[in-house]
Amino acid sequence: MSTEKTLIIVKHDGVSRSLIGEVVRRFENIGLKIVAMKMVWADERVAGEHYLVSDEWAKGVFSKAKVAAESKGLEFPYDDYKSYADNIQLMNREYLMEGPVVAMVFEGPHVVEIGRKIVGSTEPRQAPPGTIRGDYMFDSYVVADGNKRSIRNLIHASGTVDEATREIALWFKPEELHSYQKSLDSYHS
Ligand code: ADP
Ligand code: MG
């Protein structure tokens, strides 16, 4: 069984809310293996490259916000997905640099998918109870857009295996990633 890695970041709002331990606990409780962990105050390069505006990401942020607005019967007043995403990328850069964050890499089968399940939807308003974003935040597209800021959702989790590979290389040096055995490894060796 091939294993994956995923990047999990407790963003600064999570650090400020004293949620580092809670986030680690939720991942550790289901047996996922931490292979790297550090507190970082991101610089412009790292914060700017973290959310690279690929066409796929731009279409994704645009359509998630559009669907959320239309599901509430609200008009979605933007039509250019690229400039919408460029603006979010700029706001996210500030969000990621506002204070130190805790970056972690978890390893295991399906860990990207499982990480997203633990974290919950991008918009805390939609994230179900039991997920980190659903349990600890209430922010929404409407409120964030009205205040011209990123949605405050406490945590980052890689969305795909390819995204994880790129993000881990951005935040960690190869020697900061550790390789070791845990008891649960015997189930998927
Ligand atoms: P996720 O973090 O769930 O993978 P995305 O990759 O789509 O979500 O977006 C990255 C981050 O950008 C989100 O976590 C959120 O903080 C912010 N964001 C996304 N879409 C919007 C939006 N429409 N308005 C404000 N902030 C947004
Ligand atoms: Mg994402």
Image (spheres, rainbow, N blue to C red):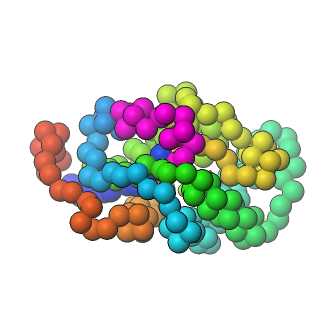
Q: Position of residue 93 (x, y in %)?
A: 61, 62
Residue 72, percent from left and from top: 80, 39
Q: Is residue 15 magenta?
A: yes
Would you say residue 65 sits in the magenta stretch? no
Q: Is residue 70 above or below residue 77?
A: above
Q: Magenta: predominant secondary structure element? A: helix
Q: Quadrant of residue 44?
A: bottom right
| Residue 65 visible to an observer of this rendering | yes
Quarter of image, ligand 2: bottom right
Q: Nearer the viewer, residue 75 or 11?
A: 11
Residue 183 x/y as whole percent: 13, 39
Residue 187 spot, x, y in % from top left: 16, 42
User: At x 57% / y 58%, what residue is drawn?
Assistant: 97
Highlighted range, magenta: 11-26
Q: Residue at x 21, y 57 (%)?
A: 178
Q: Does the image show residue 109?
A: no
